[in-house]
């Protein structure tokens, strides 16, 4: 999907949210600093991202203290990664029942079947509250949960 003039920001943001395989999860670290880590991502039917996280990981310890997180997702690109569209979603993360998330996650990340059943791994869902899309120069927009998860419509703001 290209960032063409005819495409709405919601369509692009929804596509990135549903097609991204990996993202950077930002949590609040123990000493108040942001902590970012690379995580695998898969969408639930409504578009909410789910993650498979180890209880041994620092980001999991962080989210047990503070549920507010951000997740940076980047559009697949052959060229300059900084020219690709990127979406940051913000929301609260919550543990997800393994049965509800396993099939969706493993369909995107079959290699994770090796450790998905380990006792220290669990599925987590981000309840999206808002997002920030940087599509191209001059095409930057904030989106709410309804727009990101498929219930709203928004056109690119007029320039000038």
Image (tube, helix red, strand yellow):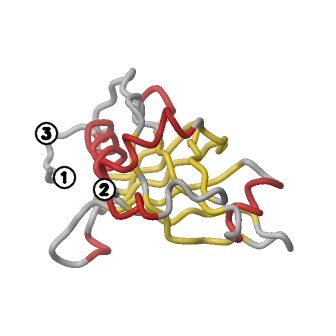
Name the secondary structure under disc 3. loop
Judge left or right: residue 60 versus residue 134.
right
Q: What residue is pinned by disc 3?
A: 6
Judge left or right: residue 107 versus residue 3.
right
Residue projecting furthest to the right: 31
- Residue 160: x and y in percent read 30, 46
Q: Quadrant of residue 44?
A: top left
Q: How would you rate the neighbour count of disc 3 (Cα within 10 Å): few for under 14, some for 14-19, many for 20 or more?
A: few
Q: Residue at x 49, y 63 (%)?
A: 115
Name the secondary structure under disc 2. strand
The reply to whether callout 2 and callout 1 are in contact (CB within 8 Å) is yes
Q: How would you rate the neighbour count of disc 2 (Cα within 10 Å): few for under 14, some for 14-19, many for 20 or more?
A: many
Is residue 39 positioned above or below 17 on the image? below
Q: How would you rate the neighbour count of disc 1 (Cα within 10 Å): few for under 14, some for 14-19, many for 20 or more?
A: some
- Residue 120: x and y in percent read 66, 60
Q: What residue is pinned by disc 2?
A: 135
Q: Residue at x 47, y 44 (%)?
A: 49
């Amino acid at each position: 999907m290209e960032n063409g003039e005819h495409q709405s920001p919601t369509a692009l943001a929804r596509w990135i949210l549903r097609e991204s395989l990996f993202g950077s999860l930002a949590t609040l670290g123990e000493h108040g600093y942001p902590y970012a880590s690379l995580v695998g991502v898969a969408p639930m039917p409504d578009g909410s991202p789910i993650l498979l996280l180890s209880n041994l990981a620092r980001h999991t310890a962080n989210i047990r203290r503070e549920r507010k997180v951000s997740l940076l997702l980047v559009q697949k690109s052959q060229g300059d990664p900084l020219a690709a569209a990127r979406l940051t979603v913000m929301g609260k993360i919550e543990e997800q029942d393994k049965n509800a998330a396993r099939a969706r996650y493993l369909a995107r990340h079959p290699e994770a079947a090796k450790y998905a059943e380990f006792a220290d791994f669990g599925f987590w869902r981000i309840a999206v509250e808002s997002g920030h899309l940087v599509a191209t120069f001059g095409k930057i927009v904030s989106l709410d949960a309804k727009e990101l998860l498929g219930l709203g419509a928004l056109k690119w703001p007029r320039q000038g």
